[in-house]
Image: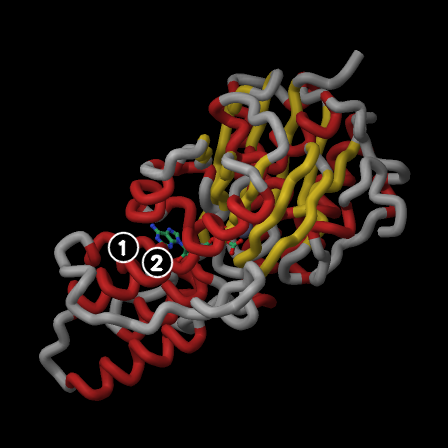
């Protein structure tokens, strides 16, 4: 019998996430955020992040089990992110997940972090491939063609900063703290998106790549030229408008070229209000994760494992799979992760 109650762990960066799904329904999703710990550094301190994961992970497990109303022996399979991410933080969740599974005699399923982000969109129902999938987060911005679950072809990616990274850097320029994507978006609601016309990145390209570092520099130059009385809300709104336009422009081009009118948008930036609004206005089938599952969490890892198991696509030798800081999604495009 296939496992139906699956526990998923994500420690790829600075959030300790553990979630539990039953038959594809999310029963628990607990995330211990380290934002306050890293805020004074203006970014994630990898060593500190690893130590913090270790400190809180037992408690996060207890809280997740409590939220689901389950005891550990009722869990039927354990999944954990094995890459990409910070190598030290990945190791904590992966070793914890393997140990938990081994001690309970359960199957263990290593999951690619980006496959987890894609699977976060399954929380509200199944999605039939083929579809395009835009993943926009703090560490990644890529567009994939998903011909079948588990089969991912990268059509394009950011050539420099990820979209979330650009949000965070511009938020910092505006004094909105770290990570500032969400705060910037809130402020943007009070601003005029047409106040400043920034050049649209890579508008003339033939492919499906993204670029955000030039835009970030343009905002930095503008901020420096305006001095003390910054129209922060207008800058935030104009920046946000440009990023959303750039992301959706590439999706529209790819849709035309590949003849696919189904779009899944995942990753932390999928929490962005304007991106949701503009994407949902497209004449396509568009899917987002629930807001709580947009940023890093363990439930999306459990959902990805559930999908794999449902399709009969487990992983050969899961115990031998090690943490990988760099791991293209295409590397796992086969059911059994043969070469990892
Ligand atoms: O997926 P995620 O939690 O972590 C990575 O895997 O990178 O994404 C975090 C990123 C951060 O850069 C954060 O600023 C951005 O997602 N983000 C947002 C919003 N909420 C989170 N960006 C724009 N608008 C938001 N509402
Ligand atoms: Zn992520």
Counting from the top left corner in percent of width and height, residue 255 is at 52, 44
Residue at 65%, 33% in the rendered image: 304
Q: Residues within 10 Å of mark 2 (few under 14, many from 20)?
A: many
Count of marks placed on residues:
2
Q: Which residue is mark 1?
A: 185
Whether residues under marks 1 and 2 lie with C-beta atoms below 8 angstroms apart, the answer is yes
Is the residue 35 above or below the residue 302 in the image? below
Is residue 56 rendered to the left or right of residue 287? right
Disc 2 secondary structure class: helix
* Front residue of 22 and 311: 311
Q: Is residue 77 visible?
A: yes
Using the rendered image of the protein, determine whether residue 59 is visible from the camera's viewpoint.
no
Locate residue 145, reporting x and y percent: 63, 44
* Mark linked to residue 181: 2
Q: In the structure shown, which secondary structural element does the residue marked by tag 1 occupy?
A: helix
Mark 1 → mark 2, Cα distance in angstroms: 6 Å
Badge 1, how many Cα within 10 Å: few under 14, some, many 20+?
many
Q: For disc 1, does the CB lie below 8 Å from ligand 1?
A: yes
| Residue 125 horizontal side relative to residue 168, left or right | right
Say which quadrant the N terminus sits in.
top right
Q: Is residue 24 above or below residue 97?
A: above
148 horizontally vs 314: left or right: left
Q: Residue at x 67, y 27 (%)?
A: 307
Q: Is mark 2 within 8 Å of ligand 1?
A: yes
- Residues 292 and 256: in front is 256
């Amino acid at each position: 019998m296939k496992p139906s109650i699956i526990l998923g762990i994500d420690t790829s960066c600075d959030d300790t996430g553990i979630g539990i799904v039953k038959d594809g329904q999310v029963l628990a999703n607990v995330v211990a955020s380290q934002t306050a710990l890293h805020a004074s550094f203006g970014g994630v301190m990898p060593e500190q992040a690893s130590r913090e994961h270790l400190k809180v992970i037992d408690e996060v497990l207890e809280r997740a089990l409590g939220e689901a109303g389950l005891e550990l022996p009722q869990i039927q399979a354990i999944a954990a992110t094995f890459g990409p991410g910070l190598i030290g933080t990945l190791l904590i969740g992966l070793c914890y997940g393997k140990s938990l599974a081994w001690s309970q005699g359960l199957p263990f399923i290593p999951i690619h972090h980006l496959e987890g982000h894609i699977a976060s969109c399954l929380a509200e129902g199944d999605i039939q491939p083929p579809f395009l999938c835009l993943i926009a987060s703090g560490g990644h911005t890529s567009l994939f063609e998903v011909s079948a679950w588990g089969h991912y072809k990268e059509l394009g990616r950011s050539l420099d900063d990820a979209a979330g990274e650009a949000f965070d850097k511009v938020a910092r320029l505006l004094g909105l703290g770290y990570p500032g994507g969400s705060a910037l978006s809130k402020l943007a609601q009070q601003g005029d998106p047409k106040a400043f016309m920034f050049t649209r990145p890579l508008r003339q390209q033939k492919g499906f790549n993204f670029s955000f570092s030039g835009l970030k520099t343009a905002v930095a130059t503008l901020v420096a030229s305006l001095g003390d009385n910054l129209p922060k809300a207008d800058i935030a709104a104009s920046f946000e408008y440009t990023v959303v336009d750039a992301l959706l422009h590439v999706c529209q081009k790819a849709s035309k070229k590949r003849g696919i009118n189904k779009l899944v948008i995942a990753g932390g930036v999928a929490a962005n209000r304007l991106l949701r609004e503009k994407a949902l206005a497209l004449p396509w089938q568009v899917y987002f994760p629930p807001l709580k599952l947009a940023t890093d969490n363990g439930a999306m890892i459990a959902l990805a494992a559930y999908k794999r198991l449902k399709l009969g696509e487990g992983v050969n030798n899961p115990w031998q799979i090690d943490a990988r800081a760099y791991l293209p999604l295409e590397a796992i495009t086969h059911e059994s992760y043969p070469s990892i």
